[in-house]
Structure formats: C-alpha cells, structure tokens
Image (spheres, rainbow, N blue to C red):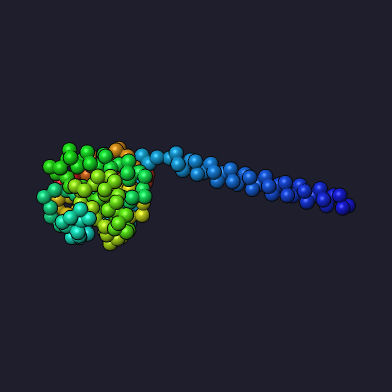
Amino acid sequence: MTEVLIISNVLSWILILVLALTVLALARQIGVLHERIKPVGALSFAKVIKAGEVAPAFTLPSLNGGSVSLGGTAARSTLLFFLSPSCPVCKTLLPLLKSVQSAEQDWLQLVLASDGAEPEHLEFIRQQHLETLPYLLSREVGMAYQIGKLPYAVLISEAGAVSAHGLINNREHLESLFEADRLGSNPGINGGSAGISSQPAH
C-alpha cells in the first residue's frame, strides 16, 4: 500500500512538472509571436481626440529655444511626433522624420514631443542632432491626446483640426498617415481592423 502511495505521489509530481513546463513553453511562444507581429498600418490608440476634431491649443517653450504653438490656424500643417529617449523604434525613425521635414517643409512642420527629466532630453537632442527641430517637454500635451504607446504621431491641419493620428513603426505607417489625410480614408475604424484615423483632406 505504501509503495502504491509513493508511486502515485511521484506520478503526480511528474504530471505537475510537465504541466508547468508546458505553460512556460506556451508563454514563451506567445512572446515570440508578439514580437513577430507587425502592424499593417498606423494603429490608432487615442481615445479622446478624434480625427476631424479641433486640436487642443498649446503654446509652449521648445528645449531648442523659442516657443511652439499647437492648434489654431497656422501657415502649415503640423506633424506632432511623440517619442522618448528610451524608445529604440523612435531613434530608428529620426532620420526618416528629418528627411520628411526637409522634403515637405513647404506645407509641413515637424514638432517633437515627450515628457520626463529635462537633462535626459537635452542629452538626447545632442546625441541625435535634433537641435534644429522644435522639441516640447510637456506631460499635458501627451495627456491631451491620451498617448499610451510610442512612437505616435498626430497630423494637425492648417485650420487647427486633427487630420490623422496613429502609432508609427516604420516609413509605411508614416506615409499611410499622409495618405489617409489626402484621401480622407478611414480604414480600421469603420472596417474593424487595425488602421489609421483620419479626416478628409482640405
């Protein structure tokens, strides 16, 4: 009888160990799949500000000098790009953003935005050579757009309305932001899949 109990206990522990290993393996596989999945378009997470609505108005100092006005009537559209010094994807997108700013400067102004400790951002500006770009350090701006993931971009029209917004992971996401504004398309919101949020272009 004792031997039967011992064998039963051993088998129970073996079963528990196998189940634990299975759970760990499944958790690891889910993590791998999560890393491999890439969004098809710029994913929209903002809950408060919607495309077509008036952009919140801010006038704030830039870490690079001067002040920056967001919202309201302006001479050019504004691409408000939320980033962080600790965001690897943000860093990889900076050359693309600089190129876009240079090529589209006739109609578009690029504004970088973040929050946190000022010394960290000043060092980030120096390392990434961002001295020529407006750089806002404001928790209020991020809260106004309910930014929960980075890097995130908001396109604001000359009239001061939110044209399009979304999570930006690569060049295609950024281009889809401009395309949605130009075409007035709204994939993902009406279709129920991940996409960008936009309003008709003016």
Q: Residue furthest left?
A: 75
Residue 153: % across, % down: 28, 48
Q: Residue at x 13, y 55 (%)?
A: 73
> Does residue 20 sit above or below 146 in this rendering?
above
Residue 176 found in image quarter: top left
- Residue 19 seen in the current view: yes
Residue 22 found in image quarter: top right
**Number of disc labels:** 0
Residue 155: % across, % down: 23, 48
Q: Nearer the viewer, residue 1 or 128?
A: 128
Residue 175 found in image quarter: top left
Q: Nearer the viewer, residue 45 or 189?
A: 45
Q: Residue at x 68, y 47 (%)?
A: 17
Q: Residue furthest bottom?
A: 140
- Residue 115 seen in the current view: no
Q: Nearer the viewer, residue 194 or 86?
A: 86
Residue 108: % across, % down: 17, 45
Q: Residue at x 59, y 46 (%)?
A: 24
Please give left or right for residue 24 compared with residue 190 in the image: right
> Does residue 194 sit above or below 56 in this rendering?
above
Residue 41: % across, % down: 33, 41
Q: Residue at x 35, y 43 (%)?
A: 89
